[in-house]
Image: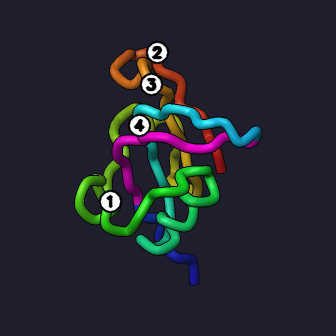
């Protein structure tokens, strides 16, 4: 049986990139089968301080927004981001991290 992918989105904050440098992210999107998996995927994507509390209290559940829905359809497992300064632009680039 296939598990349903749940959608989460919220502020990105900071993450470590592949070189170990801190990168600022404006918006982040996660597709996961559970909240626990969403937190684990965020950690794998370099968001070292991301917690279940942050997901529960500050992130939206069940929606990604029009731009993300148009970019990834149907929903998939993974982490996507929009870099700082681009979030409110119509031409903002959504980048897949995982």
The residue lying at 53 percent from left, 51 percent from top is 47
| Label ID, residue 91 | 2
List the residue tagged with mark 4: 27
Please report whichever mark, 1 or 3, sits nearer to the chain's N-terminal start: 1
Q: Which of 98/44 is in front?
A: 44
The residue lying at 41 percent from left, 37 percent from top is 27
Asked if residue 60 is among those painted magenta in the image, a careful observer would answer no
Please report whichever mark, 4 or 3, sits nearer to the chain's N-terminal start: 4
| Label ID, residue 84 | 3
Q: Magenta stretch: give its range.
A: 7-18
Is residue 69 visible in the rendered image? The answer is: no
Q: Nearer the viewer, mark 1 or mark 2?
A: 1
Q: Which of 97/43 is in front?
A: 43
Name the outermost residue toward the front: 21
Name the outermost residue toward the left: 57
Gap in angstroms between the C-alphas marked 1 and 4: 14 Å
The residue lying at 46 percent from left, 35 percent from top is 70
Q: Which of 41/20 is in front?
A: 20
Q: Nearer the viewer, mark 1 or mark 4?
A: 1
């Amino acid at each position: 049986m296939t598990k349903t992918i749940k959608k989460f989105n919220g502020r990105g904050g900071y993450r470590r990139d592949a070189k170990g440098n801190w990168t600022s992210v404006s918006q982040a999107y996660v597709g996961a089968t559970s909240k626990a998996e969403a937190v684990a995927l965020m950690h794998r994507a370099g968001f070292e301080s991301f917690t279940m509390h942050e997901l529960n209290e500050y992130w939206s559940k069940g929606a990604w927004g029009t731009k993300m829905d148009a970019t990834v359809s149907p929903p998939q497992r993974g982490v996507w981001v929009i870099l700082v300064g681009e979030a409110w632009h119509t031409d903002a680039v959504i980048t897949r991290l995982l």
